Image (cartoon, rainbow, N blue to C red):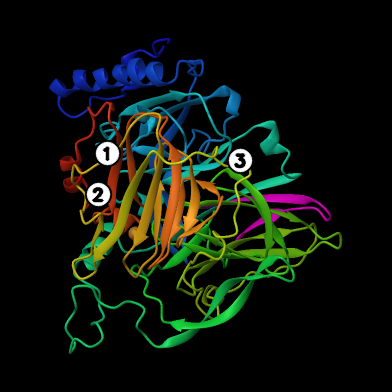
Amino acid sequence: MKAPRIPPHKIFTREVRSGQKTTSILGVLIIVFGGAVSSTSPTAAADTGNPTRLFVKEVPLRVLGRDTTVIAVEQADGTQGYQPQAAAGFQVEVVNQLKVPTAMHWHGLILPNLMDGVPFITQEPIQPGGVFRYNFPFKQSGTYWMHSHYGLQEQYLAAAPLIIWTDEERSKAARQYVVDLTDFSFTPPADILKNLKKGMPMPAAGTGGKKAAMPKMGAGPAIEMKAQVWKDDSQSFSSAIVRAPTPDVDVSYDALLANRRTLDDPEVLSVNPGETVLLRLIAAASSTSFQIDTGTLMGEIVAVDGKGVQPLKGNIFQLATAQRLDLRFTIPSTGGAFPILAQGEGTKLLCGVVLSTPGAKWSPKSPTEIRAAIPAALLDNTQERRLRALHPLTSRPPDRSLPAVLGGNMMKFIWTINGRAYPNRDALVVRRGERVQMIMTNQTQMGHPMHLHGHDFQVVAIDGEQLSGALRDTVMVPPGSSVTIAFDADNPGVWAFHCHLLYHLASGMFTVVKYEDADTRYWTPEKTTKEILGLR
Ligand SMILES: [Cu+2]
């Protein structure tokens, strides 16, 4: 294992915290390289000494005619995120140009634990002006993403695509585009969280106007919503109008963005008649899950969370917060303009891109027309139940079964795993070499997109029904549902396991999966809470 070639003074562009701490933080960097990479990855990617620098910085953005400031994760030339060749390995320096600390997590990657970028679990936060070097070999390819795991920065769009290219990925379609979906609010995230903590605005039914400890959600009048259904005759997903109780969505956003643009000014992506096109959709939103409507253009799912599935056709798809969906299309030989829309679950909010052949006509909608006629239904198991992994886990009985009961107290806006809210030290413990199954049971009335760091897992049962489902890193557990996942405990460390709705994880629905022999030097959950509020 080679030592990093860049001398310390170039790695830390300015002193971090007070002078006496500088040495220890430099020590952290050396430990990261000497420990994590060499112990868990004897075949670490060669350090080229020429990493891609990713700058975490404030940038201006105009949303619905209003100027605002958000966070970007971009290269020196303005390229958002990172799209390396798999063979080159992960070679990145994160440069914190914010006025506050940050930490960048590589969502879905199987990597050495101390490269995972989670503050107070795998490293200290990167201080303003600080730089942190990441170097490891890739074990995957396809559609991944990166986002800040610090405070509530994700709500300021501190996220970007991470696409790992191989010949196989390139050959999936003649033309490929990344579509990064986010949610936007003019309200600062700390205020959003404070408002949620004040309690849900509506009184619970049958309590005489007082809020119940766990208000009955979804108890409003039944309304029409658009849902995804499976059609046996066409063997495809399509839409249907359903009547269901008014959905409760805890955060109301001002806009949804696709590649940082609203639907009145969408990105128009060039395609040619007859061509195959792959869209790599990333649900990079902090608290929104999406219903994807491809309109007259039939698509097929070829991968979820970067991992291949047996293709499934349709024109309506589900994409939970933090998941990815690779959709392949064949553009009709007659050409045309094809809006690909993403609607927030339980809302009328829309964003999207337009696939357009040369000369095709498409007129953008006005800012007042960019809402759907009816809300999108809440995500359910319709799609997940049908997904089949292209490369499932080897067949093996589990050595260990871990329960993960998802609970909450809506009035206090506290969300729990196995009855405990983070920060706590009740880790889910596993042993190296085990096949682990985790049974996630959702006792709340909101869906929770659950994410396990550092591992691919397979969905092996939904509501008690066994299946050889998709390999994923994030799975939606709908209200009242039970989803069982399986994974091989082959990557030692302390790994974050949490709901990916930003305000749920910040309010306790967060824990860790800890290997018995893990290096726990950075695992300091008690430090997390004071870092959550009032930061950007
Ligand atoms: Cu949640």
Residue 256: percent from left, percent from top: 48, 63
Q: Are marks 3 and 2 in contact (CB under 8 Å)?
A: no
Residue 346: percent from left, percent from top: 45, 73
Query: Principal SS element in the magenta part?
Result: strand
Q: Is residue 270 magenta?
A: yes
Examine the rendered structure and indicate whether residue 188 appears above or below residue 108.
Answer: below
Residue at 40% from the left image edge and 21% from the top image edge: 40
Q: Are marks 1 and 2 in contact (CB under 8 Å)?
A: yes
Residue 475 seen: yes
Q: Which residues are magenta?
A: 266-282
Query: What whole-number distance in Å separates the C-alpha atoms at marks 1 and 2?
Result: 9 Å
Quadrant holding the N terminus: top left
Please tell me how crowded label 3 is: few (under 14), some (14-19), or many (20+) other residues with Cα within 10 Å.
some
Residue at 37% from the left image edge and 63% from the top image edge: 185
Q: Is mark 2 within 8 Å of ligand 1?
A: no
Going by the numbered disc 2, the residue's amino acid type is: Leu
Q: Secondary structure at mark 2?
A: loop
Left or right for 136, reference 118: right
- Viewer-proximal residue among 84 and 304: 304
Q: Is residue 263 magenta?
A: no
Going by the numbered disc 3, the residue's amino acid type is: His
- Tell which tag, 1 or 3, sits nearer the viewer: 3
